[in-house]
Amino acid sequence: MPKVKTNKAAKKRYSFTAQEKVKRTKANRRHRLATKTARQRKTGKIQDAYADKTVVAGIKRLLPYGN
């Protein structure tokens, strides 16, 4: 049986915690922060978030070896 390839784009965006939760980075925090409201900047400040339960199965399929 051949190895399953890891999706490289998913590998850069997601990682697994010790409890098998999927960790992701919030969007809209890279540039153009001056034009965003204080509320947008404050709520997006936390870089680490967890992926929704509905997409975890798909992410695990893209990362078969738990990268």
Image (cartoon, rainbow, N blue to C red):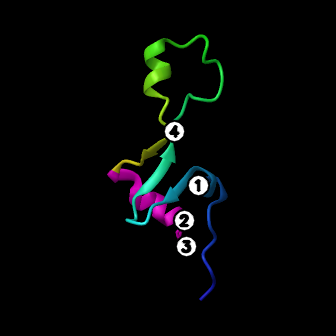
Residue 33 on image: x %, y %:
60, 18
Amino acid type of the residue tagged 2 in the rendering: Leu
Secondary structure found at label 4: loop
Question: How much space separates mark 2 and mark 1, taking CA atoms?
Answer: 7 Å
- Segment tinted magenta in the rendering: 53-67
Question: How much space separates mark 3 and mark 2, taking CA atoms?
Answer: 6 Å
- Kindly identify which numbered label has been placed on residue 47: 4
Secondary structure found at label 2: loop
Disc 1 marks which residue?
10
* Classed neighbour count for the residue bearing mark 3: other residues with Cα under 10 Å, few (<14), some (14–19), many (≥20): few
Amino acid type of the residue tagged 1 in the rendering: Ala
Query: Where the N terminus falls, by quadrant?
Result: bottom right
Kindly indicate whether the residue at mark 3 contacts the one at mark 4 (C-beta within 8 angstroms).
no
**First-in-chain label (3 vs 1):** 1
Give the foreground label among 4 and 1. Answer: 4
Amino acid type of the residue tagged 3 in the rendering: Tyr
Question: Does the stretch in magenta take in 7?
Answer: no
Q: Residue at x 48, y 28 (%)?
A: 44
